[in-house]
Image: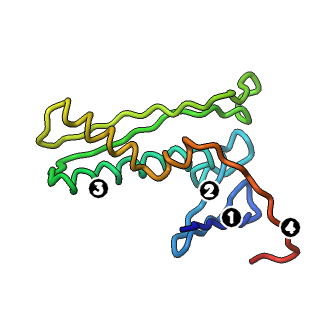
Amino acid sequence: MKVQATAKFLGRGFQTQINTGHHTFLSDRMKQVGGTDLGADSLQLLLSAYAASLATSIVSVAKEKKVKIFELEVVTTGLLYPEYDELTSAAETNEIQYTVHLDCPLNDVEKNALIAEAQDKSSVRQVLARPTTFVHCELTNSPT
């Protein structure tokens, strides 16, 4: 199944309206680089996508195993911001670090096994772990 996202510049700072099906949200950049900081920037959205994907995969695996989750939090950190710091350059290899707080009736070994299984099922991880080709299809004279 293909998924589509549309980004439309709103004319102020770097504010961009993102549409994904019937969901709409705002992306922007930090004030220090000319944005208005009214929305997450693209790298924050990428990290958020992985955090959300891993969290929902953990919930899915827990439901399959009939494990009740009392509390779950996934925190992701990573990726360089070369446009925000002249001394920072993009890395050859990106690294996304994450921590998981999982409160459920499993011991730590069982929790780690559940998280490992969920990692493999995370749709965002599956996409990020594979080489990706960016294909410019066409330039249009009018918006979609």
Tag 2 or tag 3, which sits nearer the N-term? 2
Q: How crowded is mark 1: few (under 14 residues within 10 Å), some or many (20 or more)?
A: some
Residue holding disc 1: 7
Instruction: Report the residue at 47% width, 46% height from top.
Output: 50
Q: Position of residue 18 (x, y in %)?
A: 62, 65
Q: Which residue type does callout 4 highlight?
A: Leu
Of labels 4 and 1, the one closer to you: 4
The percent position of residue 1, horizontal first and vertical second, equals 53, 68
**Could you give the CA–CA distance between mark 4 and mark 1, rounded to whole angstroms?**
15 Å
Q: Earlier in the sequence, mark 3 or mark 4?
A: 3
Q: Residue at x 55, y 73 (%)?
A: 21
Identify the mark at residue 45; answer none if there is no mark: none
Pointer 2 residue: 27
Q: Element under label 2?
A: strand
Vertical relation: 1 (above or below) 96:
below
| Label placed on residue 139 | 4
**Measured Cα–Cα span from mark 1 to mark 3:** 30 Å
Q: Where is residue 141 in the image (x, y as percent from the top left)?
A: 88, 74
- Mark 2 to mark 1 CA distance (whole Å): 9 Å
Label 4: few (<14), some (14–19) or many (≥20) C-alpha neighbours in 10 Å: few
Which badge, 2 or 4, is on the more N-terminal residue?
Answer: 2
Badge 3 is on which residue? 60
